[in-house]
Image: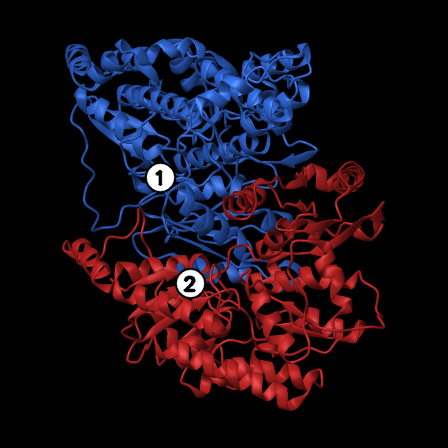
Amino acid sequence: MSRQASSMCPAFGAIRNLLRMEDAMPIVISSGDGCMYGHTFVAHFYVANRPIFSPGVSSQMWAKGSVFDELKAMAIEMAEKHQPSIIPICSLCVSDTVGLPFELLPKQVGNTEIVYVPLPAYSVHTHARAKDIVVDSLVWRLPSQRKARSGVNLLGEVFPSDPIKIDEVLRRIGTHVNTTVPGPRWADYVAMVDGAVNAPLHPFYSESVKRMKMKQGLPFLEGAPVGIDGTYAWIKGIGETLKLNAAVVEAVACEERDKVKAAMADYPLKGLTFMVAGYEGHEFLLVRLLIEAGASVPYLSTAVNTNPLAREEEAWLRERGCTVLYGANFDDEIGALQDHAYDCVIGTTPLCSHAKELGIPSIYYTNAMATRSLMFAEGASDILSLMISTYRSKERYHKIASFFSETGTPVQSHSSWTPKIDLTEHLIANDAFAPAAGE
Amino acid sequence: MGLQQELPSDVVNTPIRERVTDLDHAGGDTGAMQVFASLRDGNVVLDGPVGCHVMPAVAVINYTDSVPYLQNVTCSELSENEVTIAGTLGVLKEKVARADVPGRQVFIVSTPMSELIGAAWTTTDEDVKGSPLFFNAKSLDDDEWVARDRALLFLWQHRDHFVAPPDAAPAARPAGPSVNIIGPTYGCFNSYSDLAELKRLLAGIGAPINAIYPWEAHSYDTARLSDATATIVMYKEFGKSLAREVGLPTFDAPFGLEDTTAFLRGIAKALGLEAQAEAFIAREKKTTLAAWQDIWRSTHSDFFANSPIAIVAPPSYKDGLERYLGGELGLPISYSAYRTGPESAPSEAVRDALANASPSPMMIFGSINERMIVAQEKLPSRFYQASFPGAVVRRATGTPFMGYAGAVWLLQTVCEVLFDTLFANLPTSYAPPHRATVATADILRDAPAVTTDSGKGQNSVLTWTDEAKALAEKTVKRVPFFVRVSVTKKLRAEAEKLARERGTDVDRSVVEEITARYAPGR
C-alpha cells in the first residue's frame, strides 16, 4: 500500500517558485542525471525559459568531496559575474544526506545573498512543504525587528490580479496589501518584515508563519477571501487582527459576502457530485466554493499533510459532508472513484485519465485551476462557470468512453497493471474519520 | 544466478562535467525503468523516494510518450526512517509483494538514494524462476543509455529465469527466417512512427518479425531472440550489446534513400528474400517515393544548397539526419553535435556555436535546449524538435524520420519550414494603405526642401554612411540566403524611413535601431 502522497518530486515545488524569481539564480545540487533531467524537463516545459545549474555529481565526486568545492566556486563566480539579488542553493536528496558543509558558503558576495534551501525530497514529502521551506529559508535571512509595520503580507501563489482585488477591499477597511510571496523579486520577500500580519491564503506555509511570529513578531491569519462564508470571515479576521474600525469592517465584509452570494446564484451546482484531488492546498478553497454552490463533494483528496493552518478549513468541510484525505496518493484517488457516481472530476493526471476512461468529465487540477482566480465574487463566477461548462460536456466524454469500451473493458496504456486498493480500509488506517491530530 | 558476472556493455557514458546545465539525457534509474516497463509483463518497483518515481513515470512520460502515467511502475517511497535508520528492505518488500502477481515479472531498480545508502534486494528465493529481480542501475554514475543497454543485457542474462504463465498464448513463431527489432522503449524520440515504418518496410519485403524487443515482448520471450536470422538495432545509443550476445547479423535502422535501400537489400540477403526486396523497392519508387521525387523535381529543392541547418541530437538521429539532409538533399550542415555519449558537446559549446554561426542556420534540429538557445540568443533560425528533452506529442505514426516514409516526411518538413521562413520575411506586411495627406502639387512643392546632413531633398536617395552600410551588410549575412532579398528590402525601407523622420543620413544608429527591431542578432 502506498503510504506517501503522490507528488511530482516534492522539491520541484520549491525549484519552481525560485526559478520564477527574476533576480534569483538558483543552483540545484541534483542527485544524478535522472534527477536533473526530470527537474529541467518539467521546468523548461512550464516554468521558465532559463538554464538550471548544478555542480556535476558522481559517486567519485561525492567520495572526493569535490562537489562542495565546485558548488562554492560556482556560487561565488555566478554572484560576481551576474550579480543576482539571491542565489538559492537547493540541496536535494543525495547532497542533503551526504551532508555538505553549507555553513562554509559565504552568506553574501557583493550584494548577492547566498541562501541554503534544504530540499531532501524523502523528508519534504509534498510540494506544499517545499514551498513553505523556500519562504522560511529566505525570510529567515531577514532582520528581526522593524519599527513601522503596516499592511497585510499575502502568502500563496495566487492569480496575478488577486492581490490587486484584495488590496482594493483592504483599503476600504483601512489597511492594504504590503507584499505577496512567492513573488518574482527578492524585494518581495524582504518587504515581509514591514507587514503587520501574515495571511497564508493556502493552508500551508505553517513553518514560515510560525517562525516569523517567533523571530519577527508577526501574527498570522488563516483562511482566504473565497466563497460566501470565507470572504466574510477573512475580512472580519483582518479587521480584528489589526484592530480596525469594527463597523466599517462589518459593512465591507457583508457587502463582499453578498456579492459572492449573488454571483454564485448564477451557477447552481445542486444535485451534482464532484470529486476533487489536488496537491497545492488550493483545493480546500475550491471545494468550499463547490459546496456553497450546492454541489456534493464526498472527499477532498490532497497531497498536503495535516497542518494546523488547515484545521478550521477542514472542520468547515467536514460539517458539510466532505472528508479530507491528507497525504493522499494515486491509489487512494483511483479507488475513491469507484465509491460514488461522480458528475465531474478535478484532479491529478492519473485520476483524470481514469475518470476520462470511464466517461466522466474531468480536468487536470494544476492546468485548469492554477490559471484562475477563486477570490471574491469574480473568482467564484470564474471557477463555477468553468465547472458548469466542464459538466455540460459530459455527452462528449460519454461518447468517447463508449466508443473505446465497445471491445470490452476500457483499453489501458501499453502495459497495464493497476494495484487494487480498498479506500475505506485506507481511510480508516489513516484516521481520516478521526478528529484532526494535535499540532 | 545472482553470482553470475555481469555481461560487459559496449555503450560508453556521457562524461560527467564539473558543472551541469541544460542536460540532455536522463540517469540510469530512468533508463532501466523505461526498458523494464516496456515489457508487456514487466512490473517495476523503483527503490527510492516518491519523486524518483513520479518525476520519470508520471510527469515526464506524459510529455515524451503522451501516456498519462506508467501503470506498471511503483516505488518504495523512501522517507527519513528508511534513509537514516531502517534501510529500504522493509518498505521494498511490501511493494514487491504487491507487484509480484501472477503473470507479471517484477524488476526492482535502484535509484541514487538507495545506491547512496547501499541498499540492495536480498532474498532467499532469487533462484526461484519468475521471482523478483534486482537491477543495480548505477544511477549515481551511469546515464540513461548505458543503463538501457545494461538492462537489455540483464534481461538476456536472466532469460532462463522468466516463465510464461500457464494460460499464456503461445508466441507466434515464424516458420522460416525472421528478424528481431531491438530498442523500442519508452522515452525514445519519435519511436512510435519509426517503429511503424520499420515494420512497414519488413512487411514490404516479406520478412517475418520474430520479436520487437522489449516493446512488444514478454520477459519470457527473451530466450526466443536467438530464433531469428538477423537483428535490427534501432538506436546506436543502446541495444548493441544485447545484439552482440544474441549473435546474429545486425543492421542499424536506416535514414534516407541510400541507407534504406542498402538496409532492405542487406536484410533480404540475410533472409534469402532478394527478389521480394527488389520488387518492393521498385514498387516504393512508384508509391511512397513518388511524392519524394515530385518534391525533389520541384523548385523547392533549389533553395537547399543555400539553406544551412544545424543538428544537435543523440547519435542515431544526428548521424542519420546529417547523412540524409546533408549528404542526399544537399543542405549545408553549419553545425552538428552529439548531446550524449563520450563525444557529447558541452551545452556552452553548443550555445556558442549556434549563436555565432554566420549565416545562422535556417533550421535547428534539436531538443528544448536548442529551442531555448534560439529564443534566448534571438536567432532567426526555425527550431524543429528531433530529440528529447522537450514536451512534444509524437504518437501519430505518420511522422517517421527513418526509412523511405521518413525520407518523404523529412523532405516535406524542410520545405514547410522554408515556406514558413519565407512568409515571416515577406518585405511588406499587411497594413491599411497610407492615407494621402498631401496632394501631388504639395509633394512637388516640398520635394526640394533640404532636410538631410548631406544636403539632399525629401525624396532624394538617401546617403548611407560607411558604418551603416557595414552594419547592414553584416546583419543581412546572418539571415538565410534565400530570404536575403526580402530582408535587405525591409531593412532599407525601414532605415530610410527613420532617417527621413530624423532628417539625417542613414547612419549607424539608425541601422542599429532597425536591426534590433527586425533582424535581431547578437
Q: Report how far apart the C-alphas of labels 1 and 2 lie in the structure.
A: 35 Å
Q: Secondary structure at mark 2?
A: helix
Q: Is residue A49 left or right of residue B105?
A: right
Q: Is residue A339 left or right of residue A176?
A: left
Q: Residue at x 72, y 60 (%)?
A: A189
Question: Can residue A382 be seen?
Answer: yes
Q: Residue at x 55, y 64 (%)?
A: A158
- Image coords of residue B202 (percent x, y): 22, 23
Q: Quadrant of the C terminus of chain B?
A: top right
- Image coords of residue B333 (percent x, y): 48, 14
Chain letter for mark 2: A
Instruction: Give the color of chain A as drawn.
Output: red
Instruction: Give the color of chain B as drawn.
Output: blue
Name the quadrant containing residue A182: bottom right
Residue B131, disc:
none
- Image coords of residue B179 (percent x, y): 26, 24
Q: Residue at x 46, y 11 (%)?
A: B332
Q: Residue at x 77, y 63 (%)?
A: A140
Residue B160, disc:
1
Residue A330, disc:
2
Q: Quadrant of the N terminus of chain B?
A: top left
- Image coords of residue B54 (percent x, y): 48, 53
Chain letter for mark 1: B
> Which amino acid, mark 1?
Asp
